[in-house]
Amino acid sequence: MRSTGQDQQQVRSVWQKLHIDLPLLIGILSLMTLGCFIVYSAGGQEMDIVYRHGKRLGVAVIVMLFVAQIPPLSYRKWAVPVFVVGVLMLVSVLLFGHVGKGAQRWLDLGVTKFQPSEIMKLVVPIMIAWFISQDNLPVKVFTVIQAFVLVLIPTLLIAKQPDLGTSLLIASSGIFVIFLAGASWKLIAICAGLASAFAPILWMFLMKDYQRQRVMTFLNPEQDPLGSGYHIIQSKIAIGSGGVEGKGWLQGTQSQLEFLPERHTDFIFSVFSEEFGLIGVAVLLAVYLFIVMRGLWIAVNAQHAFTKLLAGSITLTFFVYVFVNIGMVSGLLPVVGVPLPLVSYGGTSMVTLLAGFGMLMAISTHRRFHV
Amino acid sequence: MAPRRVIIRNQTAEANLFARRSFIAFCGVLALLIILFANVFTLQISAYEKYQTRSNSNRIKLLPVAPNRGLIYDRNGVLLADNKPVYSLEIIPEDVKDIKKSVKQVSELLGISEERQDKFFKAIRGKRRFKPVELHSRLSDQQVALFSVNQHKFPGVFVDARLKRYYPFADLTTHNLGYVARINRKDANKLEQQGKAENYAATYGIGKLGIEKYYEDILHGTIGHQEVEINNQGRVVRTLDYTPPIPGKDLTLSLDIELQMIAKRALSGKRGAIVAMDPRSGEVLAMYSNPSYDGNLFVHGISSKNYRNLLNSKDLPLINRSVQGYPPASTVKPFLALTGLEENIITPDTKVWDPGWYQLEGLPNKYRDWKKWGHGWVDLTRAIEQSCNIYFFDLAFKLGITKISTMMENFGFGDYTGIDIHEESKAIMPSVGWKRGRYNKPWYTGETLSVGIGQSYWTVTPLQLTQALTTLVNEGERKVPHLLKATREAVTTEDNTVKYVNKEIVYEAQAPIQLKNSNNWRTVLDAMHSTVQKLGATGHAAFKGSQYDAAGKTGSAQVARIKQDEKYDAEKTEESKRDNAMFIAFAPYEAPEIVVAVAIENVAKGGGATNAAPVARQIMDQYFGDRVITSSAQTQKKNSVSTIVHHGDHNHDNPLVHSQLVNNQQVAPQQQDVSY
């Protein structure tokens, strides 16, 4: 027994030296593997697209492992300058940005183009976690208001691009920090009230026509089955016709015959549920739940308020991805462009996401040495 | 940056607070996951069937597959209506790189007109790019060969074959077979009403006339279906299931195409019709109307110019004369004689004095015999042999119109024969009631005299003549004339192979004509026999030296009215007003196998004996061939498996025939006084 214990200690220490959180890694890799299979099925059964997907996954995993090597408390030094630069870049995107798919998201640096909003997904929780953790928890009302303003600046800038999905994720990453920092329930209730008061203003003044159309479509997709309602109707048909056991891998007629739009990106969950059925969905949701539980476990066990808040925010934001994506393709939420994390085909967001998991791993593995 | 404050942290309190908040967040996560799962559960379990159905209706389409139309054969198995592949040049726009260049090059190669090219470019607009579009609808064999050699140069261009009707004998069979042509809106509406539209979903053409129309249901067959999977653009991905179409049944007609050819040759250059029938069965052996036209023209859609030519031709080729009314003239004298015998107006020995004219008491009109100085004393046999008008004026006068029309109606005059084509006319059997109904005028006795020599309002179709003659030679037993002899039926034999056997059609027996004295049949038939066999009788010359024992009756119908003392001279008369020549005949006398009726319009010289009788002779010569018929019945063995009962079902709504009928009034005369 003792020797086993020692072995375990040794094994753990090997992973720890590598700054890898094994349960998290297993969860992530299993979703990625699954993703490759579904991307193959949804992408017209061509290996090309799987290779490209695999390459991006490889890059993202390397980024994750690299980020995991950085001691998490050192982020604090960079929080303010990076946040400021990020906001400036968002402003310049609006001024000189490259227009792609009808929205200004890309900044052309001459060598490469990138989306500043992706960086902000990580910078905002770091910034807010740093800002709040300077003081004792629970967070005070005034600090909350200040933190709100900090969250609102990038959120509005991104919403203006317009990129509703990302701005939603960034806003929630900040709000999660505030929530986990122990903002009083009274305050939360007031904020919720303000938010619902804000909704009509958002509808009337901030949302663009196509966004309003999406919401209308969400409320009644059958009203325009061949136009704006087409996506969601076809997606629900795909999911529903999967039944308990699904039609089988590569056998989903909705996806293979291309009735489903955006099959390998935003609507990959529909392909998955058509081919693997309710059983597959249960397993998939269980894996997501496992990752969220592991993330929260890391957060609870982190030894500093900053790392606790950061880890919690990253984990819960990850879940927002899952919820928004599955919710939208199954008709619970309006269609906003959010991919299914770790499964959907897609570049930039995957790297950002895994950088976030790298931070989680760093928080999980560095804690013994940096208090 | 503000100077760093020294914070005294309560680590445990913070950790507890954070853990509490994390737990709440976790509960939130769990709740949302349950909502997601419940929603997917609803979609996949509760609404499974709905979405399953919608998914299938998304992807599965039924493509109709047209059945092959049944073929038509003559009685000896000669193919009369075939299905021939027709080649069209098709282009799938999506598969062609430079469509303008490709179309130009292929058109140059095959000599396709600019007009067709323009039509093509118009057609590809608004069509799905992967659906083939037709550039040329009917390629010649040469064009097909030329294209096949060069096909590699034209990706996306291909030749498609479709089966279309082809009549190898062209105009020889058109009036019997009719033709198949494109289903027009009227046909489509009718199919819709009859609930047959679905069965015709993939069918190009439908029977428009004749046998093709009458037996449309048998010939057409049952549609098949190809169940295919399609993608979101409607492109066929694969075939899931295939229900083959059931081809239409092949028909074997009673026609003998060789006899038909003889008929055509005999009528060449003339307007007229020939009907030959087997009196034992009612099978029509030959039925030809001249001039005819090529039904193949209509299969591919006749050009309006060609159609106008057919419609406006003064020879009226579109009319099937074998089922249109002609004044029967003297051909009906045997039937009238029979009526006289049956009504006891005359006996075989009754003699009438023929001075060359007949006059009713108290009336100035003289009714003339064709022989100016008369025949002297004539009895029944001599009256028929010499076609003596005076005898029949007298007989008709004594019978009266009612007795005549009643008996003639028993022979089928003035009614549909029940033949299996729809183009038949009833012709006219005049009677007191008919005249009242038609002209609202009383019947005049003078008209009865004209009826006595087959003139006046009386018209008969050549087919009616063969039917009546059949009844006569069968001594009262009536037959329905018909063209369909058998259908080819698939029969599964004991060793489970499918064989095709001819299934003979049995036609419903008609109530026979019962005479009070059945010897009267023989009396009349004998007279017809001697008309052909006795030297000097009207039918003798035409049948001199024949190897079979024929009997018959001549007739010459006057088409134009001749004034009281005017003399008719064919050569000086306008062609359309010249006499019609008629002849009916049967052979062998003892046991008739064939009855023939001939009608020839507006002959230049002579009458039935010199114009129509030789034509009947040619038909019979062909029919009997080298056979020498002496006497005694020829029995033919017949194996008939049969259950189908034939009913004369007539539907005379063919507008073509009706419009032609109006033009054809010249065939139906008003009133004639003299018969030759």
Image (tube, coloured by chain):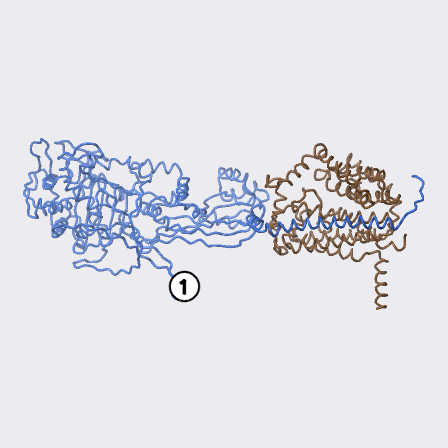
Rendered view: B34 above or below B430: below
Q: Position of residue B511 (x, y in %)?
A: 21, 51
Q: Position of residue A43 (x, y in %)?
A: 66, 50
Q: Amino acid at mark 1?
A: Thr
Q: Position of residue B282 (x, y in %)?
A: 25, 52
- Which residue lies most toward the front here? A186
Q: Is residue B355 left or right of residue B551?
A: left
The colour one sees for chain A in the rendered image is brown
Q: Neighbour class for label 1 at 10 Å: few (<14), some, many (≥20)?
A: few
The colour one sees for chain B in the rendered image is blue
Quadrant for the N terminus of chain A, please. Answer: bottom right
Does residue B155 show up? no
Q: Residue at x 9, y 44 (%)?
A: B345
In-front residue for pair B218/A121 = A121
Q: Is residue B90 left or right of residue B422?
A: right
Rendered view: A122 above or below B627: above
Which structural element holds mark 1?
Answer: loop
Q: Position of residue B564 (x, y in %)?
A: 13, 31
The answer for which chain carries disc 1 is B
Which residue corresponds to mark 1?
B497
In-front residue for pair A169/B176 = A169
Residue B412 lies in quadrant: top left
Does residue A40 show up? yes
In-front residue for pair B263/A43 = A43
